[in-house]
Amino acid sequence: MAAPAVPALLAVWEQGQDQSPTWRALALLGAATPEADGDALARWPLGRRDAALMRLRADLFGARVEAVAACPACAEAVELSFAPTDMDDDGTPAGAAPGAVTSADLLAVAALPAGERARAIADRHGPGEDFAAVERRLAAADPLARLEVALHCPACGHDWVAPFDVVGFLWAELHHWALRLLRDVHTLARAYGWAEKDILAMHPHRRRRYLELVAS
Ligand SMILES: [Zn+2]
């Protein structure tokens, strides 16, 4: 797995504007592993998928995650910063997802109302079985599927645990990256008359230097 080339990443961002988080996750994984079969990626357990996406985001945007969360007790904006070192590929063979929820499950139930999806996924994994029991089994089969961050509010002292939405966070970063990049292309194309593909092919350091010269 390698960080995708700039034009491939931009294409995922462009095509993913109106798509679901599951589509975005699979498109990003597909861009990072062009040799992989898309159906096989869709059968990865969500924990494995999210671990791979976190490695991709570290390659693209740096290892450290910086975010802001609202304190549920006093609404203070609390900054959080962590470097996920404990997340790794869980070693599940590609294509085999025994008993864990996968992107293929999420795609299969995407057309249902949000309130019915969990039960429909449980039915796929344990038809006719007790819903709560299947839910517990699915959760136990893939503990990495639910990432949580421990947070502390310096203003009021409240401690809480918040879910960390890997796909949503990475997509937001990708969105800001794409907007910055297009603005830079706009600036250089207007100043020098260069073609978009040539500006995108340029090493970021060289692009930065030209932007400084345009601004000077
Ligand atoms: Zn607080």
Image (cartoon, rainbow, N blue to C red):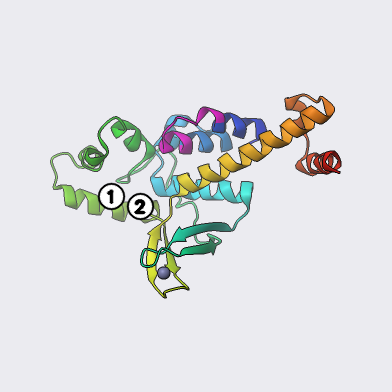
Part of the protein shown in magenta: 14-25
Residue 21: image tag: none
Depth check, front residue: 82 or 87: 82
Please indicate whether residue 33 sits to the left or right of residue 92 in the image. Answer: right
Residue 195, given in percent of the width and then of the height, sits at 77, 24
SS under mark 2: loop
Q: Which residue is mark 1?
A: 138
Look at the numbered disc 1 and say if its residue's Cβ is closer than 8 Å to ligand 1: no
- Residue found at x 72% / y 31%: 186
How many numbered marks are there? 2
Say whether residue 134 is magenta.
no
Marks 1 and 2: in contact by CB < 8 Å?
A: yes
Depth check, front residue: 185 or 77: 77
Residue 179, given in percent of the width and then of the height, sits at 62, 37
Residue 198, given in percent of the width and then of the height, sits at 77, 27
- How crowded pointer 2 is (Cα within 10 Å; few <14, some 14-19, many 20+) is rated as many
The residues bearing labels 2 and 1 have C-alpha atoms spaced at a distance of: 7 Å
- Residue found at x 13% / y 40%: 128
- Amino acid of disc 2: Asp
Quadrant for residue 180, please give it: top right
Depth check, front residue: 156 or 63: 156
Quadrant for residue 41, please give it: top left
Q: Quadrant of ligand 1?
A: bottom left
SS under mark 1: helix
- Amino acid of disc 1: Leu
Q: Which residue is mark 2?
A: 142
Say whether residue 22 is magenta.
yes
- Specify whether residue 3 is in view: no
Look at the numbered disc 2 and say if its residue's Cβ is closer than 8 Å to ligand 1: no
Vertically, is 43 above or below 138? Answer: above
Please indicate whether residue 56 sits to the left or right of residue 167 in the image. Answer: right
